[in-house]
Structures are given as structure tokens and as C-alpha cells.
Image: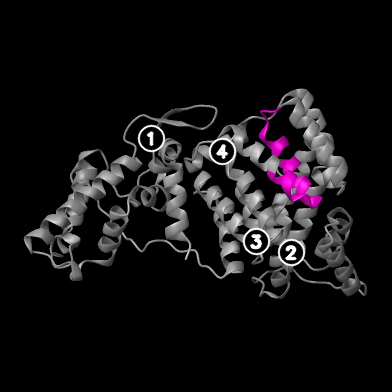
Amino acid sequence: MMRSSLIFLAMASSTLQAQVAPQAPTIAVAHHEPNFDSERRQANELFLAQKVLEALPLYEDLCRQDPTVAVFAERHGAGLLAKQATLSDPAAQSKLRLQAINELKRAQSLGDNSAYVRTVLSAGTKTVQGALITGIPLTVGYTYAGKPDAQAVFHQAEAAFGRSDWAGAVKLYTQASALDPAWYDAALYAGDTYFRLKNGPDAGIWFAKAIAIDPDRETAYRYWGDALFQTGDPMGAREKFVEAVVAEPYATPPFLELGQWAQRTGHQIVRPAITRPEFTTPDGVLKIDPELAASTQDGRASWIVYQQYRVAHGARTLNQTIVAGASDANAVVHPSGYQHTVAEEHAALRAMLSDIDSKLKAGTLLEANLDPSISNLRKLEAANALGAWVAINAADAGIRSDYPEYRAHHRKHLIDYVDAYLIH
């Protein structure tokens, strides 16, 4: 389900830049009519006042007059998504949604790389097909669509929301949630609409209800973080954005929101500087890199220990895809062969670090000469943060598929890692 929601807050900040940003080369030609400037000003005023449906026909006409402006395409797409919510016919909704997505793709092709555009376009991975491609299983917050009676009320709520009737929408969303308390979207959008009504406490209550239904979907954390930031609680927002990253570290929106928070609060989003050397296995046997083997003074030769451990457990390259024997309705893959896991990667790194420690103890290697990647790995292991680094920053298809199991037992550990190592 797609809707234009709190991400309009990101749009307001990004689209002003988009209006003056250089556009990508295009063969489209602008034909400005006499009313172009006045129509542009009127559309901008309506859009920034969140009167998106009123602005829609203006942006449609502006796109006709000048198809080279990315922000026109972005706002036209956003308006189409808002209009989609007011329709009751599923076929008409699907048709309009496709038109909206195509407009946002056009905006992106014109140079619009705003958080809004990337967030909406990334939603395509939250289908069974998309999840199988990315190797990231879906959770109940994505797969459960509500009971029929709750769905009927929810559609009325979406129509009210699309008309900016926040008071009417919130009554209907909460009614839909009462009819089906296990439905994530009903609770999520009740919270979102309470925020539109500038009722932060009730918004938080409903976001918390959505999180209780599915703590492994990132959206409610992210919306809650937006609400907290807008109501003057940047540290509370940081906490929720970090939790969103831990819920879905391979999705685009959580890191986009955390990055925006960092920009607004004087922080930076970083990642430990670690590079693992590639390896190959012709005929299933590790091919030793002679340059790596000769790197004894900085400890890089010990990467061969890591590679040998990986190959002994079935790896053939550093990062691998999964050969899926089967998958279920939530896109959980059941491999027919080797799958790289967090546990295997952590153990292989520990084997390499143990070899480093032995050489340091024997005096054949000096700590001051260690390769920076190895030094950083040693620091992470000493701080009990190496497993979290593997899960979030060293994931291939196998580790992405393994992540839900790791997260189930290490959520607090992952939160501490993101908070301490990725935010500076």
C-alpha cells in the first residue's frame, strides 16, 4: 500500500533545492505559456500548504508546459498518489499508482534524488517478488492486509486523508484498527493522522501500537521519529530513527531519515573503514593471492586464514547469492545449498584476528604497523560490536536472509552499534 504521508515533510525541504538544481540533459522542450509563472507560484503555494489535490491539475499543466523540471514531475507524482487514495475502484487505483510511479521515475531521471523520491520508489521491494530479489524476507506488517470489514472502513479513511480531512480520517483509521487490532497499517496511519492534527502524544500511542504489531517493520519508528523531531525532541527522534535502521537496515528510507536528522543536528552518518579482500575458488579450492600472502608486515597475510575458514564452510567468493530451494509467502528463502550467515562471517573474522593476536604475542608483527582495516576489526571485536558490524555493514544475500534471526536475539546490541558507530 502506497500513500503520501509524513514524507511530505522531507519534500518541503528537498524540493526548494530541486527548483534550482541543475537538470540532467533531456530532449524534451519547454513551451512556457503567458500564465506559466503565475501558475507555478500558485501551485507552489498550494503544495507547501499541503493542499496537494488542489495543486495536482496545476502541476499536470506545468509538466505539459515544461517537462524538463524535476520538481514539477515529483510534485505531480505526489499528487497522483494522493488522488489514488480517494478512489474506491482497485483497478483505477492501480492505474493511477503506476502513473504516479512513472512520474517519480521521470523526476529521478531529471536529476531529482530527493529523499521523497527514493523512499517512494524503494517501496517496490516490499512485495513478495521484490523481497525474493533482494533476499530480505517480509514481515506481518507488510503481508497482512486486514479483515474485510476493517478494510472497508480503512478505504474511507484513505479517501478522507486524501482530501486533507484529518479529523474525519483519524476517526475512521481508529475505527478500522478497533475492527482489526492486528492490522499494522490501520494503527500506523491513525498515528500519522494524529500528527497531522498536531496531537503528538496520541500520535506516539498509535505508532507504538503499530510497533507492537510488527517491531520488524521500520515505518512506524520512522514516522514517530519525524513527529518527535517536528515537535522539538531531536534526541527522541534519534532513538526512533536508530530503531528504524535496526528494524530494516537494508531498506532505503531508514538511512535517508537518519541522514536528514544528522544534517539538521550537526552530526554525520559514517561507517567503520573496513575492506575485506576478495577471493576466488577455481574448482572449489581457494586461490591464494601471492600479494596478500607476502603482506606480513601489516598483518594482511592473516586474511588468508579468514578465507580458508570461509571456503571450508562452503563459500566460493567473498559475497554470494543464495540458491533457493524454496520460499514461503513471506519470501523467506530456504536454501538448497550454501548460505553465508552472520555467525559464519563472525567466526571467520575471529579466526583471522586470533592469528593476528598470535603474531603480535610472538613479536613477528607490530601493532603500530597493522593495516587500518584489521585495526578497526580488532577494536570492534574488543567492544563486542563485530557481530553487529557484520549484520549491518557486511551483508550479502545470505546475511540479509539470516538477519531476521540475528535481530531477534540481538536487537539491543544492534541499536547500541548504530548509535555508537554510525552516528558521529
Give x and y (percent) for residue 115. Answer: 63, 59
**How far is disc 3 from disc 1 in space, using C-alphas?**
33 Å
Residue at image position (69%, 53%) is 227
Q: Amino acid type of disc 4?
A: Pro
For label 2, the residue is: 12
Residue at image position (32%, 60%) is 275
Please rate how many residues cluster around mark 3, counting C-alpha atoms within 10 Å: few if below 14, some from 14 to 19, many from 20. Answer: many
Q: Is residue 106 left or right of residue 164?
A: left
Q: Amino acid type of disc 2?
A: Ala
Please rate how many residues cluster around mark 4, counting C-alpha atoms within 10 Å: few if below 14, some from 14 to 19, many from 20. Answer: many
Q: Secondary structure at mark 2?
A: helix
Lower sequence index among marks 4 and 3:
3
For label 4, the residue is: 215
Q: Is residue 363 left or right of residue 149?
A: left
Give the image's coloring scheme.
Answer: one colour
**In front: label 4 or label 1:** 4
Q: Are marks 2 and 4 in contact (CB under 8 Å)?
A: no
Quadrant in which residue 175 is drawn = top right
Give x and y (percent) for residue 23. Answer: 67, 72
Q: Secondary structure at mark 4?
A: loop
The N terminus is located in which quarter?
A: top right
For label 1, the residue is: 323
**How far is disc 2 from disc 3 in space, using C-alphas?**
17 Å
Of the numbered discs in the image, which one, if any, rests on residue 272?
A: none
Q: Is residue 82 left or right of residue 259?
A: right
For label 3, the residue is: 108
Lower sequence index among marks 2 and 1:
2
Q: Using the image, determine if residue 239 lies above or below residue 47.
A: above
Lower sequence index among marks 4 and 1:
4
**How far is disc 2 from disc 1 in space, using C-alphas?**
43 Å
Q: Nearer the viewer, residue 261 or 53?
A: 261
